[in-house]
C-alpha cells in the first residue's frame, strides 16, 4: 500500500506524525507567531511512530501529544538523535517518564546516556547555586546506539546511522555522534535524516539498495546560501542534491514520500509560498500535525 498523507487516519492505522517541525529558532508560543497561519507555527522537533515510539523530545512535546490526540500512556520507546536542546531535554524526559505507567526505553548516543544518568541523580538548587542529590528516580532504561546498531522497538526495527552534524569540520573533530534512524515496520521503511548536512559515505553505503517509503530530510535553511564547512544542515539546493544521491543508490523512487523538515522559522519561506513549488518536485513540506499513514 502506498504511503499517503492522511490528517485523520482511522483508528488502528499505523502512522508517522510530525509533532514539531521547527529548528532551534522554533516560533511556537512566541509573540511573533500569534497572528501567523497555523502551518507557519512550528515547535521544536518531535515525532511519533504510532502507537508507542517517539523520536526526539523537548518541553513542547507533551502539549503536542495532547493536541494531536496521541495517547501518552502507551509510549514505551524514545529515540534521541543527538544532544542539541531542540531535540533532547533530559529534565523534560525525566518528567515525562514519571507520568508513564511503564518504564521508558530511551535510545541514543553516549552523551544522551550520560546526561540522563546525571539528571537522574542530581538536580540544580536555585537557592544555593549548587547541584544536590535528586530524590526519586523515574523508571528509564537507556540503550546506547552507535552507527549500524539495530534494536527492536515493539514491532519496529530501528537502525542507527551517522549524521553529518555536531562536527567541527575545519579541525575534523566529531564533538558528538548525531544519529539518523532507519525504521522498518510492517513492511514499510522510514528514514529519519534530520540535522545532517551532505550524507556521509558510510551512511550512503548502509542505505544503498534499501527502498524508502518515507524519507524525512533536513531543510533547515531553505533559500539561505550556507557553507557546508560551517553547517550541519541543508538548504533547498543541498536538499535537491541529497535526493538525487538517494535516487542514484536506489533508495528513492516515485513511490517515496519525501518530506522536508526541521525548518528554520527565520529563514524558510511561509508555507503557502513554497509548499506548492516543492510539491511540484515531489517534496512534501512538513508542518506540525502532518500525519503519514503507513
Image (spheres, rainbow, N blue to C red):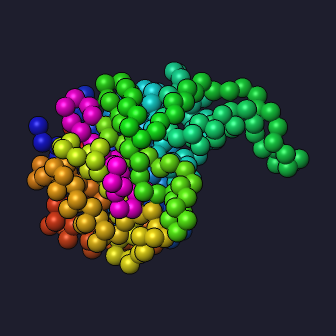
* Nearer the observer, 165 or 73: 165
- The count of marks equals 0
Q: Is residue 195 magenta?
A: yes
* Nearer the observer, 126 or 149: 149
* Nearer the observer, 107 or 39: 107
Residue 9, percent from left and from top: 23, 38
State which quadrant residue 266 falls in. bottom left
Q: Which residue reaches farthest top? A: 102
Q: Which residue reaches farthest right? A: 128
Q: Is residue 42 visible?
A: no
Residue 225, percent from left and from top: 38, 78
Q: Start and end of the magenta stretch?
A: 184-203
Q: Which residue reaches farthest bottom? A: 225
Residue 48, percent from left and from top: 38, 40
State which quadrant residue 207 falls in. top left
* 273 lies left or right of 89: left
Query: For the point 63% across and 38% down, which residue is it?
Result: 114
* Nearer the observer, 172 or 176: 172
* 59 lies left or right of 55: right
* 145 over 87 or under it: above or below: above
Query: For the point 38% across and 37% down, which residue is it?
Result: 148
* 81 lies left or right of 173: left
Q: Is residue 14 visible?
A: yes
Query: For the point 57% across and 54% down, which residue is it?
Result: 175
Quarter occupied by the C terminus: top left
Query: For the point 52% across and 69% down, which residue is it?
Result: 170
Q: Is residue 73 magenta?
A: no
Quarter occupied by the N terminus: top left
* 288 lies left or right of 242: right
Amino acid at each position: 500500500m502506498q504511503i499517503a498523507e492522511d490528517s485523520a487516519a482511522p483508528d488502528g492505522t499505523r502512522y508517522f506524525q510530525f509533532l514539531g517541525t521547527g529548528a532551534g529558532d522554533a516560533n511556537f508560543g512566541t509573540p511573533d507567531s500569534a497572528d501567523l497561519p497555523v502551518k507557519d507555527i512550528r515547535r521544536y522537533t518531535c515525532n511519533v511512530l504510532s502507537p508507542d515510539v517517539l523520536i526526539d523530545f523537548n518541553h513542547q512535546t507533551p502539549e503536542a501529544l495532547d493536541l494531536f490526540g496521541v495517547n501518552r500512556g502507551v509510549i514505551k520507546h524514545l529515540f534521541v538523535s543527538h544532544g542539541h536542546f531542540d531535540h533532547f531535554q533530559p529534565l523534560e524526559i525525566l518528567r515525562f517518564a514519571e507520568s508513564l505507567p511503564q518504564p521508558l526505553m530511551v535510545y541514543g548516543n553516549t552523551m544522551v546516556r550520560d546526561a540522563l544518568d546525571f539528571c537522574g541523580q542530581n538536580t540544580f538548587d536555585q537557592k544555593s547555586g549548587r547541584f544536590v542529590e535528586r530524590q526519586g528516580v523515574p523508571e528509564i532504561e537507556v540503550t546506547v546506539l552507535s552507527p549500524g546498531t539495530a534494536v527492536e522497538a515493539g514491532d519496529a526495527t530501528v537502525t542507527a546511522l551517522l549524521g553529518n552534524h555536531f562536527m567541527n569540520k575545519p579541525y575534523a573533530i566529531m564533538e558528538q555522534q548525531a544519529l539518523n534512524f532507519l525504521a522498518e515496520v510492517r513492511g514499510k521503511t522510514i528514514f529519519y535524516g534530520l540535522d545532517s548536512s551532505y550524507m556521509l559515505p558510510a551512511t550512503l553505503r548502509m542505505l544503498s539498495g534499501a527502498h524508502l517509503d518515507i524519507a524525512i530530510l533536513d531543510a533547515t535553511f531553505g533559500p539561505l546560501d550556507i557553507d557546508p564547512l560551517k553547517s550541519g544542515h541543508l538548504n533547498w539546493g543541498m536538499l535537491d542534491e541529497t535526493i538525487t544521491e538517494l535516487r542514484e543508490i536506489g533508495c528513492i523512487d516515485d513511490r517515496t514520500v519525501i518530506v522536508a523538515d526541521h525548518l528554520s522559522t527565520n529563514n524558510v519561506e511561509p508555507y503557502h509560498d513554497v509548499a506548492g513549488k516543492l510539491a511540484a518536485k515531489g517534496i512534501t513540506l512538513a508542518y506540525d500535525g502532518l500525519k503519514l499513514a503507513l
